[in-house]
Image: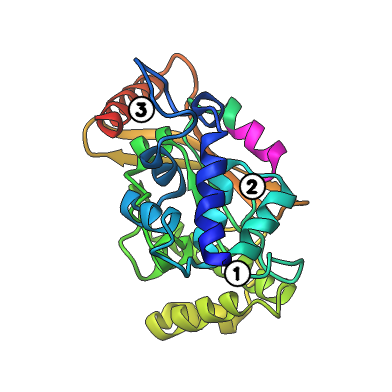
Amino acid sequence: MQTWEFGRTVRRWRDRVAPETVGVPVGGRRRAVGLRREELAALAGISADYLTRLEQGRATSPSAQVVEAIARALRLSDADRDLLYDLAGHAAPGPDLVPSRISASVQRLLDRLATTPVAVYDATWTLIVANAPYDALMGPTSTWRGIERNAVWRNLIGPGTRVVHSPEELAALQAGQVAELRRTASRYPADRSVQALVSELAAGSPRFVELWEAETVAGDRGTVKRKVVQHPTVGPIALDCDVLVVATDDVRIMLYTAEPGTEDAERLALAIVLGTQTLVD
């Protein structure tokens, strides 16, 4: 009953969401009352086929990550989010787990930054959500799965990002991110996902083990203020990177901006236009 009710509930709540309230452009005639299935799937970062199977009750075991992504895409209240977890057979995340919730107040802030490249990370530096300008600047993030979404992994083991670092800058970034991950692990000792992340990083990176055991204390939270992004179409763009920490929600909001009137500002604007047009197409 619960698995069937999960899909029916998602479908019912999808119908009640006006597209413009979640940043979906509305053009031409629409038969859908609320969000189309493809639109919700895109917002949640899952395939439309999988969402179809969930709504029809043919997929019956959505992960907690999928439930959270759907709840976030639908912008559910705390009570409705908890109900969705219950219908999926999961306990809603408690205070002993790393939060991946984007609160209503943070979402309003993101809405007001809709033309600025913005990404939101949890306390383990795992990407929660990135907006379209961020993807246009840094490359698509919607296809990242599992540990691919973790910035510590990307900078130590994975392909990195479009940000250009000197060896010294990269070493400082790695040390800062590992130091913050260690602090996170100490704050959430009961979160098995954090333990699993640390184990996977340790298995794949001697550098991680070195930094983890060194117990370095980094005051910059693993970020560098001024960054150069090597965009494949418009070339290098020098940008300011600011990270806002929302203490009550324990999430990090990363923003990229350029000084108005500069060539970098023009390149950033062009990269966003080209990238968002590609994403729409």
Side (left or right) of 27 relative to 241: left
Comparing 224 with 141, the one in front is: 141
Which residue shows up at 36% across the image and 57% down it? 50
Residue 150: % across, % down: 46, 63
Q: Residues within 10 Å of mark 2 (few under 14, many from 20)?
A: many
Q: Is residue 109 magenta?
A: yes
Query: Does label 1 or label 3 sit earlier along the sequence?
Result: 1
Name the residue carrying label 3: 272
Comparing 84 with 22, the one in front is: 84
Q: Which mark is residue 102?
A: 2
Which residue shows up at 25% across the image and 31% down it? 278
**Inter-mark Cα distance, 1 to 2:** 20 Å
Location of the C terminus by quadrant is top left
Residue type indicated by callout 2: Ile
Which residue shows up at 52% across the image and 65% down it? 3
Residue 250: % across, % down: 70, 55
**Inter-mark Cα distance, 2 to 3:** 24 Å
Residue type indicated by callout 3: Ile
Name the quadrant containing residue 133. top left
